[in-house]
Image (cartoon, rainbow, N blue to C red):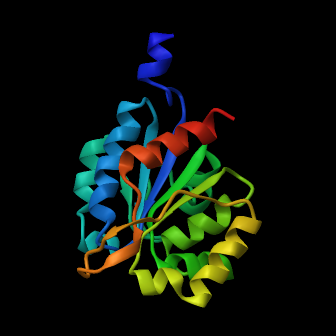
Amino acid sequence: MAREKSKPLSGREVLLCVTGGIACYKSADLASKLVQAGAGVHVAMTEAATQFVAPLTFQTLTARQVFTSLWQATEDFRSQHLSLTGSADLMIVAPATANFLAKMACGIADDLVSSLALSAQGACPILLAPAMNTRMWEAPPTRANVEKLRGWGVRFVGPEEGRLACDTVGPGRMSEPEDILARAIELLRK
């Protein structure tokens, strides 16, 4: 029982996708917490995300190759956008930017992370942790995209209300890694 409590994700595979928002610094902490909870973690990043946090950070935290491009070579030569979601028990996108939410809601697959989101539909549960400016979160297109995704069974954690990078206060702050981890554990125990 103590082992289950200390490593609640033991034997589980999580695909952590990181998109390009300032909140992606929290994603490194999330990756670490997922590994500490016993999960095997693969990380995929958008090009924009690599401008905020280096792939080496995630590689070090997960002890696994980090994927940043549809055209990146893999050791086994398998198609990443299918093999990564096929072996995942859960896909987490943190942060999930307004751009990413729009792509996912429209089925646009023009980079690795959006292709993974499309191929994950029906393969594994998807958990999104939105992060963006309050006006972007409250914009009618974003609200419609969120409702469409919820209707498809996509799960959400956050966003929270608080101080944002643009020095405003309101909803749009990415949930804390502990809260995302707790939601992931809850989803994987079902």
Q: Residue at x 51, y 55 (%)?
A: 92
Farthest-out residue, top: 1
Looking at the image, residue 141 sits to the left or right of residue 159; the answer is: right
Q: Residue at x 46, y 85 (%)?
A: 136
Q: Residue at x 54, y 88 (%)?
A: 139
Q: Looking at the picture, how far across and down is residue 101, in whole percent?
A: 56, 76
Relative to 35, say whether 99 is above or below.
below
Quarter of the figure with the C terminus:
top right
Q: Looking at the picture, how far across and down is residue 144, in whole percent?
A: 67, 82
Closest to the observer: 74 or 7? 7
Q: Is residue 138 visible?
A: yes
Q: Is residue 46 visible?
A: no
Looking at the rendered structure, the number of numbered marks drawn on it comes to 0
Q: Looking at the picture, how far across and down is residue 173, in whole percent?
A: 38, 67
Q: Looking at the picture, how far across and down is residue 48, in whole percent?
A: 34, 77
Relative to 45, say whether 6 is above or below.
above
Give the image quarter of residue 21. Answer: bottom left
Closest to the observer: 83 or 40? 40
Looking at the image, residue 158 sits to the left or right of residue 126; the answer is: left
Q: Residue at x 53, y 28 (%)?
A: 11
Closest to the observer: 35 or 70? 35
Give the image quarter of residue 52. Answer: bottom left
Relative to 119, say whether 12 is above or below.
above
Looking at the image, residue 122 sits to the left or right of residue 186; the answer is: right
Give the image quarter of residue 118. Answer: bottom right
